Image (cartoon, helix red, strand yellow):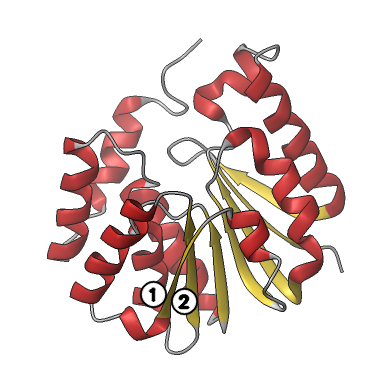
Amino acid sequence: MFDYIINPKVESYIKNLSVEEDPLIKEMEEYARKNDFPIIGREGGRVLHLIAKIKNPELIVEVGSGFGYSAYWFLKALKKGKVVLTDYQEKNIKLARQFLDKGGFRDRAEFRVGDGIKIGKEYKNIDILFLDLEKARYLEAIKELENNLSDDGIVIADNVLFQGKVIFEPENRKSKILREFNSYMFEKFFSVILPVRDGILIACKKS
C-alpha cells in the first residue's frame, strides 16, 4: 500500500504553487501540525473556497468541523450566507469560534456542539453539505441528510480514498464503508473524486 495518492513530487509542486499569505490560515495550519490534528489542507481548502465562490451559497452545513479550518476557507469566499459548524467536542468548537472571531466571521458562523448528523437534520435547503466526520458514518450521514439538500445542493466529502486503503485494503472495515459510500454517491448523485490530499468527493443531484 502507498502512503500517498499522487506522486509526492507532483504534490509538492502543486503545494508550492499554493502560496498563502493569510496569517490566520498559517496560524491554523501550525496549530494542526503541532497538535497532530487532521485538516483538509491548503489544497483541499482551495477546492472548498473555489466551490463556494462559484456557488455563492446561502447555507453551508459542516458535519465535522474540527477547529474551524474548513469553515474559514468557506467563509472567505462568501458574499452572504452562513456556515453551520458542528463537532462532538466543545473544545474544538470553542477554538473554532476564537479563530473565526479573529477572521471577522463570527456573525456568519453558527457553532453547534453535538452529533453533526442530528444537528444537520434541523436545516433545510442546504446549499453545500460538507462531510468530514468519522469515516464509518459517511454513508449514514448522506442517507440521513440528502433530503435536506436544496434542489441544486452540493455534497463535498473529505478523505474518501482513505490513504488508498479503499483499493489496497478493501477488507478494512472503514475501507468497506467508504467503498459503499463512494458507490452510493456515484449511483444516486452526479459525482467526481479529486485525488487531492486524501481524496475529495464532490457531488450534485442528478438532473
Please determine whether, in this image, residue 36 is positioned above or below residue 68: above
List x then y, in percent, for residue 182: 73, 38
Q: In this orientation, which residue lies closer to the viewer: 56 or 15?
A: 56
Mark 2, secondary structure of its residue: helix
Residue at the image position 21 percent from the left and 59 percent from the top: 25
Q: Residues within 10 Å of mark 1 (few under 14, many from 20)?
A: many
- Viewer-side label of 1, 2: 1
Mark 1, secondary structure of its residue: helix
Q: In the rendered view of the protein, which quadrant contains the C terminus?
A: bottom right
Residue at the image position 78 percent from the left and 61 percent from the top: 146
Mark 1 residue type: Leu
- Alpha-carbon span between mark 1 and mark 2: 10 Å
Mark 2 residue type: Lys
Image-based side of 92 in relation to 197, left or right: left
List x then y, in percent, for residue 78: 43, 81
N-terminal-most mark, 1 or 2 = 2
Q: In this orientation, which residue lies closer to the viewer: 147 or 42?
A: 147
List x then y, in percent, for residue 143: 80, 51
Q: In this orientation, which residue lies closer to the viewer: 151 or 143?
A: 143
Residue at the image position 57 percent from the left and 84 percent from the top: 58
Return the mark for residue 53.
2
Residue projecting furthest to the bottom: 80
List x then y, in percent, for residue 126: 66, 74
Return the mark for residue 49.
none
Image-based side of 89 in relation to 150, left or right: left
Among the 4 quarters of the image, the one containing residue 111? bottom left
Residues at badges 1 and 2 in contact (C-beta under 8 Å)?
no
Residue at the image position 27 percent from the left and 44 percent from the top: 15
Among the 4 quarters of the image, the one containing residue 36? top left
Residue annotated with mark 1: 75
Please determine whether, in this image, residue 187 is positioned above or below residue 130: above
